[in-house]
Amino acid sequence: MTVVSDILPEKPDRRAILSWALFDWAAQPFFTLITTFVFAPYFASTLAATPAEGQSLWGYATAAAGLCIALLAPVLGSVADATGGRKRWIFVFSIPFLVCCWAIWYAAPGNPHAIAIALTAFAIGTLSIEIATVFNNAMMPSLVPAARIGRLSSFGWAIGYASGLITLVIALGFFAASPETGKTLLGFKPVLGLDAATQEGDRAVGPFSALWYLVFVLPMFLFVPDMPHQARLGPAIRKGLRDLAGNLSRARSNRNIFLFLLANMIFKDGLVALFAFGGIYAAGQLGWGSIEIGTFGIILTITGVLGLILGGPMDDRFGARPVIVFSLIVLMICGLGMISIDRTTVFFVITTKAAPEGALFASLPEQVFIGLGAAIGAVSGPLQASCRSLLIRLTPREHVTQYFGLLALSGKVTSFLAPLTVGVVTALTASQPAGMSVILVFFAVGLTLLLLVKERPGG
């Protein structure tokens, strides 16, 4: 059987490494523009009957995609390990991803099928790109030595963050406009004659994300080496199905991997909820609109890139686990600080004046909120990048794709739980801070489990 060490070049190929990282660059607009900052708010505020209903429907679509990812990713990971090819699977899942991104444009106000189009395109698009990411991650050990996995992982995340920042500026500055003023964040009229009154700019991020992906994913297909073909597809699928139970059993028997996957499942749930409700919380507690939330997103993206620049070398020098532990501690401290803030209060007890009308980030609560959010952005990227480098350090090389499938499973299988808990606690207490506080519990439990994991020095 061919293993990674058989194809790992003596000297890393910089062109292959950059081409591999461009996958993250290509895919990121979907998460930044569609999932978080542009299309999702448009769906909740414009297509759905009420924002609350929109949030609920968006949550159901997210949960459906997560369940499918949990079921498919480990099996397909086993298939990829058996057949040897990863890029062919990325190609297969890129097709529905591109179709779904383009379909976002047709979720227009007044279209009786707009909600169904939006939710279906979002769910299938999420499923497709997440599974393609599993296969892209699995190519990492063939690109660099084990001692440089952390740096490579952080480089990929940094490239993705940079892409998110650039495309967010493009979307908010040139596409999406306020229906009231007809102007974008940069004060321009939308390009290409996009109608601000019907929010065509919000829907244009779908085709834009598709074109961005199509252009920038090509180098990965052209220049990144793939594992050689080993087995036929039919037998590999049957073997993959048989191996799924074995993979789960193997993970349970390996205490380190099992504890890490369990910890990842719990703190990733908290991270999903933090990003899902962060904008909603800022809107409710600070009265922010789309311009403020969009600007806040740009700030978080910038600090995320800076965090990844430092996170990679720290991962390689000190190990992935210390980076994850530090990141979780920062998330808990900053999360506690954020729930202590409203329009006139900081840290629960310090009272200040509300911001004057029309002033951007002029009040102390807003400034503290931005500072805490910037710190969260700085550690969120290294946290996720170090998770995949830690998995590689814990995992036998010949089973790396299978375990990346299990990592995707652990990160998605209960991804509905933290958002659901936030919603229930908020409803019971009628308090946004009380609802958000449960996220800190997810981080704390995940951190406790992670402290039991032992990382092998040097990979």
Image (tube, rainbow, N blue to C red):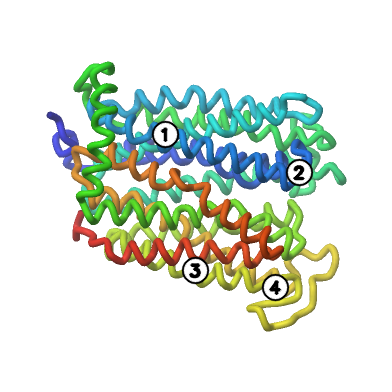
**Residue 136 screen position, x and y as percent:** 36, 36
**Residue 303 screen position, x and y as percent:** 53, 60
Q: How far is mark 4 from mark 1, CA to CA?
A: 40 Å
Q: How far is mark 1 from mark 2, CA to CA?
A: 29 Å
The answer to which of marks 3 and 2 sits earlier in the sequence is 2
What residue is pinned by disc 3? 332
What residue is pinned by disc 2? 45
Please identify, in this view, whether the residue under mark 2 or under mark 4 is nearer the observer.
2
Q: Callout 4, which amino acid?
A: Pro
Q: Is residue 138 left or right of residue 29?
A: left
* Secondary-structure class at tag 1: helix
What residue is pinned by disc 4? 365
Q: Callout 2, which amino acid?
A: Ser
* Secondary-structure class at tag 4: helix
The answer to which of marks 2 and 4 sits earlier in the sequence is 2
What residue is pinned by disc 1? 131
Q: Are marks 3 and 4 in contact (CB under 8 Å)?
A: no
Q: Are marks 2 and 4 in contact (CB under 8 Å)?
A: no
Q: How far is mark 3 from mark 1, CA to CA?
A: 29 Å
How packed is label 3: few (under 14 Cα within 10 Å), some, or many (20 or more)? Answer: some
